[in-house]
Image: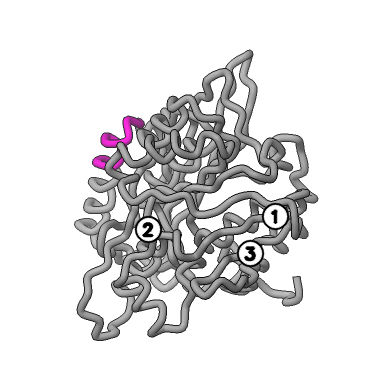
């Protein structure tokens, strides 16, 4: 791992996170359900396929343009289930609260969770509360777990992906990361950028019922689109080629990234799903996405290629190609 101590970058979703997971957790907890390292474990409970996930949220600031900690936790949990092909049903939540935190702000987080859960059609069925001494936390940290059921016939695995398949995304990238950053810092930037934080289950339900051969899905959160594509291609006998001109990016996000020297393809999202389907079905998927409010700006952004295997490449606006490798660290820590 390099450093003998935990760094902020170990939670970034990039190379440091991968090293930490591989070298510390996987070896100790190794089992068939964990080894796939997907967003949720797929379990067989007496003949019913179930998806089970857990996540923790440490976003700073807790309230940001377009969302807050509570909405983020519910939407993130729902999305981790539905990208596995599951129908999300139940969520649990654990609050770690710093002494001195305002109860009115806590109520605001809880009410936001309630609203997001109702909109997604899930129930929050259990929870836990712990309080730590003032100065030992950062307001509120939130952990969630979620359970959903997977219908028969759904098979979303990297192993089904092959050269020639198409890659789609349901809208603009980088909105969440830039919204949180603008809420965190003062740049004198006049344009308003809102997080794309949203539950994707109804959008994904429409995609799965479109009749298309869906092979892989993943929500592009920490590390953005580029990181998810690297996770898709890593160790596989294929590569990824995306067309930068086709990847939707809001002008405000693009401008702020240029000012700060950031790459929007690595900026976090909280309402974007990456879908890989058979090439013959890409128009079906695109149509299904665009019928939904969360998919109006959907695009086919790339394809699976035979060579170079395990590598992600981007075709630039001038026709050249650049490598989109995993970042060692995150451009924006504490983003979710």
User: Does the magenta segment cover residue 43?
Assistant: no
Q: What kind of element bears circle 3?
A: strand
1 or 2: mark nearer the eye: 1
Which residue shows up at 36% across the image and 70% down it? 178
Question: Do we see residue 32 in this rendering?
Answer: yes
Q: What residue is shown with label 2? A: 172
- Among the 4 quarters of the image, the one containing residue 191: bottom left
Mark seen at residue 239: 1
Looking at the image, which residue sits at the far top?
Answer: 47
Q: Foreground residue, 17 or 223?
A: 223
Task: Give the magenta range.
Answer: 114-122
Residue 308: x percent and y percent? 75, 60
Task: Give the CA distance from mark 1 to mark 2.
Answer: 23 Å
Instruction: Answer with left or right where residue 78 lies relative to residue 195.
Output: right
Magenta stretch: helix, strand or loop mostly: helix
Which residue shows up at 41% across the image and 83% down it? 260
Residue 310: x percent and y percent? 73, 57
Q: Is residue 302 above or below residue 45?
A: below
Q: Foreground residue, 321 or 220?
A: 321
Q: What kind of element bears circle 1?
A: strand
Task: Give the CA distance from mark 3 to mark 1.
Answer: 8 Å
**Disc 3 to disc 1: CB gap under 8 Å:** yes
Q: Earlier in the sequence, mark 2 or mark 3?
A: 2
Mark seen at residue 313: 3
Q: Earlier in the sequence, mark 1 or mark 2?
A: 2
**Disc 1 to disc 2: CB gap under 8 Å:** no
Q: Residues within 10 Å of mark 2 (few under 14, many from 20)?
A: many
């Amino acid at each position: 791992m390099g450093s003998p101590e935990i760094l902020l970058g170990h939670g970034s979703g990039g190379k440091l996170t991968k090293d930490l997971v591989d070298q510390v957790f996987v070896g100790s907890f190794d089992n068939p359900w964990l080894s796939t390292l997907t967003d949720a474990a797929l379990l067989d409970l007496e003949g019913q396929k179930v998806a089970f996930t857990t996540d923790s949220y440490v976003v700073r600031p807790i309230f940001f343009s377009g969302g807050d900690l509570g909405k983020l936790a519910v939407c993130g949990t729902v999305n981790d289930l539905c990208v596995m092909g599951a129908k999300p049903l139940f969520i649990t939540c654990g609050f770690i609260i710093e002494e001195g935190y305002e109860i009115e702000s806590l109520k605001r987080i809880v009410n936001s969770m309630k609203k997001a859960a109702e909109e997604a059609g899930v129930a929050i069925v259990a929870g836990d509360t712990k309080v730590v001494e003032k100065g030992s936390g950062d307001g509120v940290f939130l952990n969630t777990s979620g359970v959903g059921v997977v219908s028969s016939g759904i098979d979303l695995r990297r192993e089904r992906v092959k050269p020639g398949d198409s890659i789609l995304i349901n809208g603009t990238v980088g909105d969440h990361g830039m919204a949180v950053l603008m809420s965190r810092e003062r740049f004198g930037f006049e344009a308003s950028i809102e997080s794309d934080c949203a539950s994707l289950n109804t959008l994904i339900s429409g995609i799965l019922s479109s009749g298309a051969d869906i092979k892989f899905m993943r929500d592009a959160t920490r590390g953005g689109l580029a990181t998810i594509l690297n996770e898709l291609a890593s160790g596989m006998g294929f590569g990824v080629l995306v067309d930068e001109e086709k990847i939707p990016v809001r002008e405000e996000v693009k401008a702020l990234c240029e000012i700060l020297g950031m790459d929007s393809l690595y900026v976090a999202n909280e309402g974007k799903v990456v879908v890989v389907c058979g090439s013959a079905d890409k128009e079906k998927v695109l149509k299904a996405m665009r019928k939904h409010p969360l998919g109006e700006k959907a695009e086919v952004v790339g394809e699976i290629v035979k060579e170079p295997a395990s590598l992600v490449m981007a075709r630039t606006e001038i026709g050249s190609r650049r490598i989109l490798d995993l970042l060692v660290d995150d451009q924006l820590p504490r983003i979710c």
